[in-house]
Image (cartoon, rainbow, N blue to C red):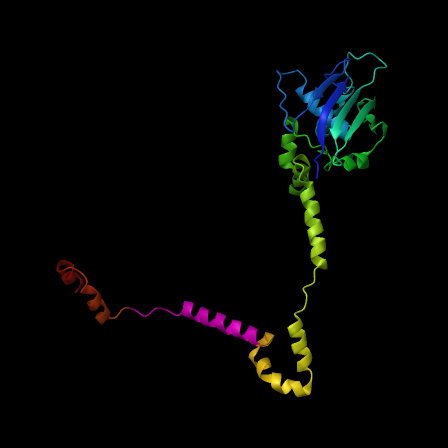
Amino acid sequence: MTLCKINKLEIQGFRAFGRNAQTLEFPSLLAAIWGPNSQGKTSLAEAVEFLLTGEIVRRALMASGQDEFADSLRNAHLPLGMDVFVEATMLGIDGKEHVVRRILEADYGKKQDCTTAVTIDGKAGDEAGLAALGIRLSQPPLRAPVLAQHTLGYVFSAKPQDRASYFKALLEVTDLDEFRGQVAALEKEIVLAENPLLGKFTLAASVPAAAQRLKPFLLQVPGEAELTAAFSAAFEVSLRRKARPRPPATRSARRVSSRCLPRSRRRRSR
């Protein structure tokens, strides 16, 4: 199965990104982005969050300081009327390229969430459409598979189940859970085929005339009660042997053992 992969990212007017759209291409599976402080690395990570979820998790984690994020998504130097968007050209799990674009319609307010609109290949999209491309989102608040410095504290304090689902989405291993579920479903459908010889033996034993000849063979096969009794008896014997005290060494035994000692130590032992 082909994994979902971002081939190109285009950002305009989002946080540290200005009026000129910035384009980043990712030709390989691994990319490293380096830059000094305050050069837009965090804005780039949050642009991916915004593209996938329509929000940034930093505001959700800072419940006491949400007012500070008012008008925080739109670049302050962007002219009025210019769109704020994040667009990604990505390879879907179907092996085809798709264009996902999210536009900011209204920024955060002091007590108001932002509103956005997402399109997939030019048509209105939603979370189900993103899932069809292979984009798996976790439970709130860390829905996007983006691990940043300000999310580490929440990751390690979250419930184990929430933390596991987040890392599964981050490392793209959710397909293993689907495979395990499919195997479990098939396991219920698997029925061991009955041995045809045993079937014939059981059928023949039900015939009185044949049962007389098969009786010696039936006696050799222990039943469930006999096996249970045998296991219980063996278990009790082993317990008695462990609990039995060891007899003390006799004088003759000490004398025999002293013969193996040197003469200088033999007198002391006596």
Residue 199 shows up from this direction? yes
Q: Quadrant of residue 164?
A: top right
x then y, percent, for residue 251? 22, 70
Q: Residue 75 appears in which quarter of the rendering?
A: top right
- How far across and down, in percent of the image, does residue 48 sit? 72, 26
Tell me if 269 is positioned left or right of 169 in this view.
left
Measured as percent of width and height from the top left, residue 194 is found at 67, 68
Image quadrant occupied by the N terminus? top right
Image vertical order of residue 213 relative to residue 77, above or below: below
Q: Main secondary structure of the magenta part?
A: helix
Q: Is 247 included in the stretch rendered in magenta? A: yes
Q: Please state which of residues 180 and 216 is positioned toward the viewer in this rendering.
A: 216
What segment is highlighted magenta in the picture? 226-248
Residue 122 placed where, x, y %?
A: 85, 27
Residue 65 visible in rendering: no
Closest to the observer: 173 or 90?
90
Q: Residue at x 39, y 70 (%)?
A: 244
Indicate yes or no whether the magenta region holds residue 84.
no
In-front residue for pair 201/153: 201
Q: Residue at x 64, y 74 (%)?
A: 198
